[in-house]
Image: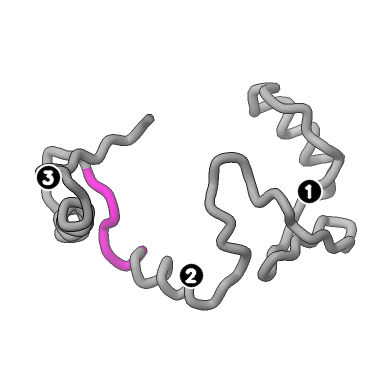
Amino acid sequence: MNTDQLAVMSSKYLMNTYRRLPVSFVKGDGYKLTCSDGKTYIDFLAGIAVNNLGYSNDKIVESIKKASERPIHVSNLYMIEEQARLAQKYIENSCLDKAFFGNSG
């Protein structure tokens, strides 16, 4: 999908919260992003309110692949080991007694 097609699709389905620039990224590697016309950019922004972990980092990709083999989220009506282990890490490294995981801010 080229940038013009993506702009049309985006304007049809996404809220117009931000004025988007006429660039669509199709590949990321380390700190660089490549757009659909092949031009490469250094990513100094990474995103709004996110961690800049770079792109296609082998350790992160492998970790995500491994995590995706098991349930990483279910309704709070049920239990999964990953949630209990993460809560344990939070509590052991804080002054809190209990953790609660919600699906929004």
Q: Which residue is mark 2?
A: 60
The kind of residue tagged 3 is Tyr
Q: Write down the quadrant of residue 17 in the picture.
A: top right
- In the rendered structure, the answer to whether residue 3 lies left or right of residue 63 reads right
Q: Main secondary structure of the magenta part?
A: loop
Mark 3 Cα within 10 Å, few/some/many (few <14, many 20+)? Answer: few
Task: Give 30 or 96, whichever is nearer the viewer.
Answer: 96
Residue stretch rendered in magenta on the structure: 68-74
What amino acid type should be assigned to the residue bearing mark 1? Ser
Alpha carbon distance from label 3 to label 1 = 39 Å
Point out residue 24 in the picture as x, y percentages from the top left corner.
78, 48
Task: Name which residue lies at 83% across and 46% down.
Answer: 23
- Which element type, helix, strand or loop, lies under badge 2? helix
Mark 1: secondary structure: loop
* Labels 2 & 1 near each other (Cβ < 8 A): no
Along the horizontal axis of the image, is 89 left or right of 5? Answer: left
Inspect the magenta stretch and tell me whether residue 91 lies in it. no
Residue hosting label 1: 24
